[in-house]
Amino acid sequence: MKVDKWIVLDTNVLVSGLLSAYGHPARIIDFLLANSVSIAYDDRIWAEYVDVLARPKFKFNPNRVSALLHFLKTNGRFTFAPPLSQLNMALVPDTDDLPFAEVAIAANVDALVTGNARHFSFLESYPVSVLTPAEFVDGWLI
């Protein structure tokens, strides 16, 4: 099946989708598993996914997490993302979000989907849509 949309998926959306089978983040995981959406990632994003999903506080089933990560890696697109060298770092509320922004720009994705859209306000002058899970599901896929 052909992928309809490419996104960068913030880790908080992935975690939310796994914590509850209901809601927009879970729908995004459904879209990923149906191959109507796929992710772009780099080694920094991938390392964060692996680290966060393994945290004991979430009590995720390790076998299910491993299967999901395998699926995402197999169906996703590894992207080399150069740093945003012209960026005024004072505008970035959380520098841990930079890999997501850099990959979104380098991969020319349809959207960066995050539960913290305000953290990405520094991307206003870049050609990337920053959407909440609700905005993505309601406005892009329905």
Image (cartoon, rainbow, N blue to C red):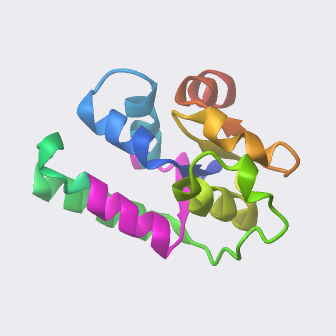
Above or below, 73 relative to 121? below
Q: Quadrant of the C terminus?
A: top right
User: Visible in this render: residue 1?
Assistant: no
Q: Is residue 59 left or right of residue 14?
A: left
Q: Nearer the viewer, residue 117 or 66?
A: 117
Q: Position of residue 21 (x, y in %)?
A: 28, 27
Q: Is residue 132 left or right of residue 67?
A: right
Q: Position of residue 131 (x, y in %)?
A: 65, 34
The residue sitting at 61% across, 59% down in the picture is: 98
Q: Nearer the viewer, residue 101 or 135?
A: 101
Which region of the structure is painted magenta?
A: 33-52
Residue lying furthest front: 90
The residue sitting at 33% across, 41% down in the picture is: 15
The residue sitting at 68% across, 63% down in the picture is: 102
Q: Position of residue 135 (x, y in %)?
A: 63, 25
Above or below, 95 relative to 91? below
Q: Position of residue 113 (x, y in %)?
A: 58, 41
Residue lying furthest right: 125
Above or below, 124 relative to 23? below
Q: Is residue 129 left or right of residue 136?
A: right
Q: Is residue 59 magenta?
A: no
The residue sitting at 50% across, 64% down in the picture is: 76
Q: Nearer the viewer, residue 79 or 82?
A: 82
Above or below, 32 relative to 118? below
Q: Is residue 40 magenta?
A: yes
Q: Total label count?
A: 0
User: Visible in this render: residue 69?
Assistant: yes
Question: Which image quarter: residue 69?
Answer: bottom left
